[in-house]
Amino acid sequence: MTYIMTIQTDDAAHFEKIKKLAQKLGVATTEESEKEKPVMSKAAQEFIALQQKYPPKKVARGIDINTIIDEVNL
């Protein structure tokens, strides 16, 4: 009968100690690691949500964008 044990840790030193113990016991070991997903800041998440709710629009060539920005900032 084959027994499988999964060990999940973020500490590389702990993992190495457990791996060495398994090797001393003569147990076959295999390794898999997952790449960490980048964590998105709360501000970035809110910005994406706003872009989805209010998609950016193209501005016509003749419009002065600085005038629009000034009006928004009032």
Image (cartoon, rainbow, N blue to C red):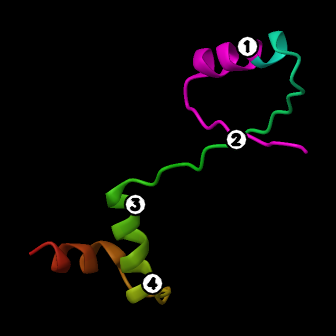
Identify the residue shown where x is 27% and y is 80%.
68
SS state under label 1 = helix
Q: Amino acid at mark 3?
A: Ala
Identify the residue shown where x is 65% and y is 36%.
7
Identify the residue shown where x is 90% and y is 27%.
28
Q: Residue 55: give x, y in percent of width and height.
A: 45, 86
Residue placed most toward the observer, 30 or 32? 30
- N-term-proximal mark, 2 vs 3: 2
23 to 70, vertically: above or below: above
Question: What residue does disc 1 label?
Answer: 21
- N-term-proximal mark, 2 vs 1: 2
SS state under label 2 = loop
Q: Would you say residue 54 is visible in this rendering? A: no
| In this picture, residue 56 sits left or right of residue 73 | right
Magenta stretch? 1-21
- N-term-proximal mark, 4 vs 1: 1
Q: Amino acid at mark 1?
A: Leu
Residue placed most toward the observer, 59 or 5? 5
Question: What residue does disc 3 label?
Answer: 44
Q: Which corner quadrant of the image does residue 48 belong to?
A: bottom left
| In this picture, residue 74 sits left or right of residue 13 | left
Question: What residue does disc 2 label?
Answer: 6
Within 10 Å of disc 4 (Cα), the crowding (few <14, some 14-19, many 20+) is few
Which of pointers 4 and 1 indicates the residue nearer the eye?
Answer: 1
On residue 31, which mark appears?
none
